Amino acid sequence: MAYKITDECVACGACESECPNNAISEGDEKYVIDPAKCTECVGFFDEPQCYAVCPTEAPVADPDHPRK
């Protein structure tokens, strides 16, 4: 399942450079994750790196975008 960034995001940008798929970009008010590119870091790391580096735990699993 892809991840999404909740409104808890403080737009610090810590997650953007950590994503191995370049799925994270700066949105209007917070960072956003492209669900078509997000793989939850499977094949790269043991846990999603966006979540690991986020100071507010804003990235969460997005049930609307399960992994195919």
Image (cartoon, helix red, strand yellow):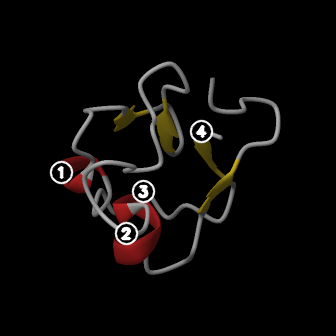
Q: Residue at x 45, y 38 (%)?
A: 39
Q: Secondary structure at mark 1?
A: helix
User: Which of the marked residues, 2 or 4, is nearer the chain's N terminus?
Assistant: 4
Question: Is disc 2 in contact with disc 3, using a CB cutoff of under 8 Å?
Answer: no
Query: Mark 1: few, some, or many residues within 10 Å (few <14, many ≥20)?
Result: some
Disc 1 target residue = 17
> Which residue in the protein does label 3 denote?
11
Image quadrant assignment for residue 62: top right
Q: CA gap, disc 2 to disc 3? A: 24 Å
Residue 1 placement (x, y as % from top left)? 65, 40
Q: Position of residue 11 (x, y in %)?
A: 42, 56
- The tag earlier along the polypeptide, 1 or 4, is 4
Tag 4: Cα neighbours inside 10 Å, few (<14), some, or many (≥20)? many
Q: Are marks 2 and 1 in contact (CB under 8 Å)?
A: no
In terms of secondary structure, where does tag 2 sit? Answer: loop
Say whether residue 38 is left or right of residue 25: right
The numbered mark at residue 46 is 2
Nearer-the-camera pick, 66 or 62? 66
Task: Report the Cα–Cα distance between label 4 and label 3.
Answer: 19 Å
> Is residue 17 left or right of 6 when viewed as pictured?
left
Q: Earlier in the sequence, mark 1 or mark 3?
A: 3
Q: Which residue is mark 4?
A: 2
Judged from the image, the secondary structure of the residue bearing numbered disc 4 is loop
From the viewer's side, name the closer residue of 42 and 4.
42
Instruction: Please identify, in this view, whether the residue under mark 2 or under mark 4 is nearer the observer.
Output: 2
Going from N to C along the chain, the mark reached first, 4 or 3, is 4
* Distance from the alpha carbon under mark 2 to that under mark 4: 15 Å
